[in-house]
Image (spheres, rainbow, N blue to C red):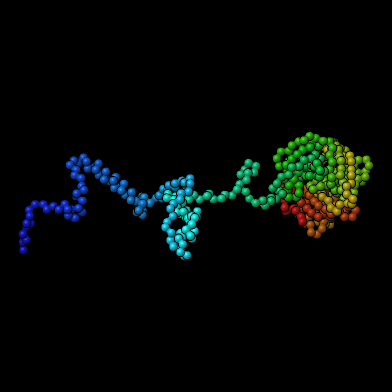
Amino acid sequence: MRFPGRLIRGPVRPDRRSFSRFASLRWAALPIIDRRWTAPMSGVALGFGLFVGVAIGPATQGSLGTTKPMVIQLPAPAAPVTAQAPPATPGPHGGGTDQGHSGDGGAQQPGGSPPVFGSPPSATPPLDTISPPPATQPTTTTGGTTTDEQPDTGGSPSDSTTALAGTVVHRNPEALSYTLAADDGRLLAIHSRNAPSPGEEIEVEARQLANGTYVEQGNRRERGSHGRATFSGTVSFSDPVTGVYTVSGPGASLLVRGGIQRNPPEVGALVEVKARIAANPEPLPVSSPGEDGCGKPPALPKPPKVALEQVGLQVTGDAPQPTTDVEGVVEGVCRDSHKLLVSADDVRESGHDIVLGVPAQIRIGALKPGQVLKLGAEIGDAGALTLSSVAGDEGTDGAEDADLVQP
């Protein structure tokens, strides 16, 4: 079946007032009569679209406008602003009441004024809150180095240094040490590979070692020189024949020549000695070192070039001391008879040895002749000595050798 053609020939345009005409947006189109205007007009349309999109962006999640909005806070007014109170509402007792007003509609309370326009509500925190920086551990500066402050737990004595001062009275080349007569009279053994000469008055920083002696730390400072010195200690050897005796302290056993009176103090006496530092002393008679069955003794040392000659002597203790220090070279290890032979002074200047009995709890199997030891001894009847402690003292390494320490 064939339908008839259109009744009205020609283009059919919708009525301008019809909805389809409005929805087609052809009424809003700008006619372009020249192609050269195509690109500029397209750019204008695109820019207008971006402007409109950013303007409405804060209301759309995920758009470019979702960044945190800027909040401008107005300064507080110089004087409080009073706003008109809202109409009163009936109270429970029939009176006009409102927040910030009394029950009878009387005087206005300070807390009842409504907020002033433009000031942020007090209950709402600011959007941009700056948190305070995290607390940091306080620091302390020590010696030019900044370190974290820590509780003071105390350090071991070997980590600290002590300022020592006095007069050098003795050198011990076997132990690589020298002896300082401190200003208070104590005998201090200080290890050093470059020992000062006797008679020098010095100041030095020293660190205490495991066996109780010291080692130099830093440079020495010379205060001058003296030909005499005063020191104190316990007598660990006495020879009435030659008049010499040994005054001992921790790590030092010094021989003192008593002079012509030939009446030295007895073993165990606590004494204070004033001595002259004499050069080129007369040699003393030397006895044979060691004992049969106690090992081969070391070679005899050379006579010292400097000696201590007694000028004054004072026995300060009322009774002999029960113990004493002994510093010496091992001259014999008598395992069968449980004896230990050591030099009567730390460089065997006296030419004699002393005998120490060895109790069962002290092991001497690892000891050998020639070793330099720092010993402790108990003083018995007639000055007999019994070994009570053992420690190495052959240089700094020997003084720190824990394997030699007994008990």
Quarter of the figure with the C terminus: bottom right
In depth, the one of 375 and 93 nearer the eye is: 93
User: Front-most of 362 and 325?
Assistant: 325
Which residue occupies 89% across, 52% down? 319
Q: Which residue is farthest bottom?
A: 92
Looking at the picture, how far across and down is residue 56, in whole percent?
Answer: 33, 51
Q: Position of residue 289 (x, y in %)?
A: 84, 48
Q: Residue visible at 70% across and 40% down?
A: 218
Left or right: 367 as drawn, with respect to 112: right
Quarter location, residue 42: top left
**Quadrant where the N terminus is found in the figure:** bottom left
Q: Does residue 57 appear left or right of residue 375 in this picture?
A: left
Q: Observer-nearest residue: 76 or 140? A: 76
- Residue 162 picture location, percent across and down: 73, 44
Circle count: 0
| Rendered residue at 76%/47% (across/down) | 213
For residue 254, side relative to residue 395 (left or right): right
Quarter-of-image position of residue 254:
top right
Across and down, in percent, residue 251 comes to 79, 47
- Is residue 150 visible in the rendered image? The answer is yes
The answer to whether residue 283 of the structure is visible from this angle is: no
Q: Residue furthest right?
A: 261
Residue at image x 20%, y 53%? 22
Residue 34 vs residue 242, the one in the foreground: 34
